Image: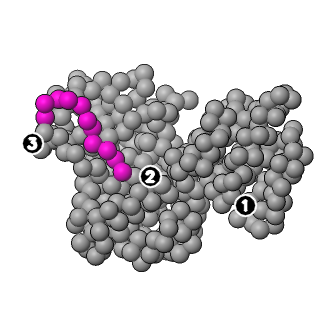
Amino acid sequence: MIGRWTTPKIEQGLRTQAAVAIVGPRQAGKTTLARSIADSRPGALYLDLESREDRDKLADPALFLRQYERNLVVLDEIHRAPEIFSTLRGLIDQGRRTGHGKGRFLVLGSASMDLLRQSSESLAGRISYIELGPFCAVELPSDEATLLRLWLRGGFPGSYLADDDGMSLRWRSDFIRTYLERDVSMFGSRVPAGSLERLWTMLAHNQGALLNASRLASGLQISSPTVQRYIDLLTDLLLVRQLMPFHRNLGKRLVKSRKVYVRDSGLVHALLGIRTFNELAGHPVVGASWEGMAIENLLEVAPDRTVASFYRTAAGAEIDLVLEVPGHGLWAIEIKRSTTGRPERGFYIACQDLKPDRRFVVNAGNEQYPIDAETQAIGVRKLAEMLAALGS
């Protein structure tokens, strides 16, 4: 089993809170991780709320769960039974009075923290939220071949660990079809699968581009508000990231549109029919795909409450990723696909505007070295490790 970097955070949450929620897209490894944690705790109970048999056990959830007051209870696919949250509140409060107030429940959901919170307002102050994405660079070997494999196949375990690239692509194609035909309907009201698939594919073609809802709407023959609603749904399902522009009163004409990324690079390639690294290397999306992969790997491990954005002015000053890291200031990050590479002039102009505390050029290599007195060249994994260490 590949160790997940979030495991210590989850264990710490169970020691300090009554409940911990692990949120992430389907097939990212939430169940495997939760089962491994449960296996280390004698008497732990696992319930899969996609199973009718397990849902039937919770016909009277308070009566059933009271029998496991001293045990960890894992509730998988909690979004299928959001009404249980009100019961959990009563059980948690009762457990606090009887001295069993920590580590009671581990709940798993295939949606964003914000969407899950809408169903669990009653657990405010009683639950910690931890996001678990697909595999990221810090969880895998540090060699170049591994990073390229992660880029091509993406980080979903079923795709990354497939026997060959063909099987990996088939897994991702099945994943996309299953999401569209079954899972989306749980969160979106009557979203046509065909329209959503076309939009998802258009976003892959325009990976990392500024959002132009009107142009997308014209291509799909739907309204701009509907396009935004579909993108918000994919964002809630943790499949798309909307990167906001950096806003600060600098007296500059700043780009105000957000940038949109399909979060997993393997899904980008599957949506575009890219099968091999050779095909990827010659495809127009190659640079944007690498940029999106690097951004996801960095944000996956960034410390809690890190604010991510990008910076671009009408005059051409640009920073691919701006991180406001709690306690560590403003970080400016330029992303390059080569193993070397220097920042463009627009990066230096943007740094003059923002005056970041740290400057990095992220590349495909493994070495860290100075480009100039203020800018460091660094590999994706090394910078991810640096960010993960700050949050540990």
Quick one: SS at disc 1?
loop
Q: Would you place residue 385 above or below residue 65 in this image?
A: above
Q: Which residues are magenta?
A: 242-252
Residue drawn at point x = 40 percent, y = 43 percent: 380
- Secondary structure mostly seen in magenta is loop
Residue 247 is a magenta residue: yes
Asked whether the beta carbons under mark 1 and mark 3 sit within 8 Å of each other, the answer is: no
The x, y position of residue 76, in whole percent, is: 70, 55
Residue drawn at point x = 27 percent, y = 61 percent: 213
Q: Which residue is mark 2?
A: 147
Query: Can residue 219 be seen at all in this image of the molecule?
Result: yes
Which of the two labelled residues, at mark 1 and mark 3, occupies the earlier sequence position? 1
Quarter of the picture containing the C terminus is top right
Query: Can residue 40 be seen at all in this image of the molecule?
Result: no
Q: Would you place residue 17 above or below residue 230 in this image?
A: above
The x, y position of residue 121, in whole percent, is: 60, 42
Camera-nearest label, 3 or 2: 3
Which of the two labelled residues, at mark 3 and mark 2, occupies the earlier sequence position? 2
Quick one: SS at disc 2?
helix
Q: Which of the two residues, 255 or 90, is positioned nearer the viewer here? A: 90
Q: Which of the two residues, 146 or 8, is positioned nearer the viewer here? A: 8
- Structural distance between the alpha carbons of marks 2 and 1: 35 Å
Q: Which of the two residues, 46 or 334, is positioned nearer the viewer here? A: 46
Horizontal relation, residue 173 to residue 273: left or right: right
